[in-house]
Image: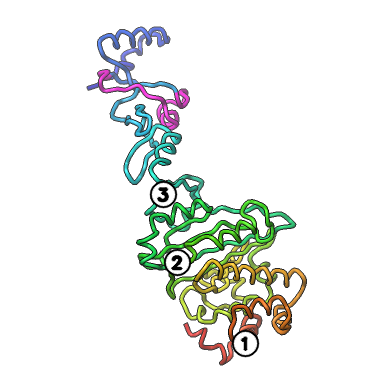
Amino acid sequence: MYFSYRTTLSTFDRHNEILDTIDRALLEIGIVEVDGLLYDVSETALVRATQGYTDNVDSSIPPGTIVRVLAEYTDTCTECGEQHYTRFGGHRDPDTGHRFCSSECLDEWMGRQDRIRVETSGGGVEWLSPDRLMPYNSIQRNMAETTCDHPYLIGFEVEKEDCEYWYRDEPTMVNEAVERGWLCVSDGSLDEYGFELVSPAYNLTDADGQWGRKQMQHDLKYYDHLDAGYSDSCGGHITVSKKGYSGAELVDFFGDFAPLLFALYPSRLRGDYAYGRSKVDTKSGTDKFRAINCQNNRVEFRIFSAVRTGEQLEWRTRLIREAILIAENGGSILDELLDKTSPLAQLLREKVNFFQEMLDRFMHFRDFWNHGIIDHEIAEYFEN
């Protein structure tokens, strides 16, 4: 029940003392004013003004000031028990519906519920349940610093599909990922038991900095979830950037590294998520499913097959570092492959059983990469 009394004061001098006298008199009979209207005091509550109150009700009242509002626009904080204003937003757990008077109370409560606090790409905060995987693009990725002496960043996206692993370890995956600075997220290209492990962007050459090379090597060695199962649908994408370089400049910088990857993982070119493109088309195209995805300031190598173990991922990192060293020294991938004593050739022989066969494929893919030539030796990989 309410009625307006402010409008009846049009013939009165609106000095504060007059209004205060009226307010005190009304309060004595159990009537109070809220936003220019009169209510029974039982229909109202005294709460601290929120930013929403200041922005939408009375800009002269700073947040935190005690104000009287309608009780229907209040709720009890789950953490501290204090009444708070909820009409224009507030702090809420979307999974349970619990409301909180402040972000501090929300953080306190969530921290005791096995929730995991992560920053979103939009600058906000999400609290993840252990059994809740967030979409990939909604999460803010940890990132190392770069300098002129250490300009390279490298990051991994490891796709997994493993039913048994999911049921056994899924409740701990999100938590352990965040503790390591990684993310465990959902991926629409995978089945219902699929998940994607997303690493920080490590500095590839700075050994001791935060998210530096030593931390990366430790994580790849001891992060057990990297050893989970996989299917043919899974990939092991690796993204590389160099301070001051555009994606197109980085493609040129790597020289013939792309055809080497084509030769190492040719079957990946047949799928729907790593199309083979020439260097010209790679630098000018917009299809994100290119085997070498050239982006604004980085290159995503989507050609890599599913990751079996962290050890295998560490080997791929060494391969990329070797390609960078060759480029920085003005060398040639081809010359290094032809020299059996070169670090690149020795590294490849650790994992490649049929080195000469791989080298022959490289020569054909090299012509395709640089000149767009698809001969009969590699035509089968471009039939999709």
Q: Give the mark, 2 or 1, whose residue is nearer the N terminus.
A: 2
Q: Nearer the viewer, mark 3 or mark 2?
A: 2
Which span is picked out in magenta? 39-64
The label number, if any, that marks residue 364 in the structure image: 1
Task: Calculate the distance from the C-alpha at mark 3 to the C-alpha at mark 2.
Answer: 22 Å
> Label 1: how many residues lie within 10 Å, few (<14), some (14-19) or many (20+)?
many
The label number, if any, that marks residue 128 in the structure image: 3
Scheme of colours in the image: rainbow
**57 is within the stretch colored magenta:** yes
The percent position of residue 78, horizontal first and vertical second, equals 34, 34
Looking at the picture, does residue 136 appear above or below residue 349?
above
The percent position of residue 95, horizontal first and vertical second, equals 34, 46
List the residue tagged with mark 2.
228
Task: Calculate the distance from the C-alpha at mark 2 to the C-alpha at mark 1.
Answer: 35 Å
The percent position of residue 103, horizontal first and vertical second, equals 44, 36
Q: Give the mark, 3 or 2, whose residue is nearer the N terminus.
A: 3
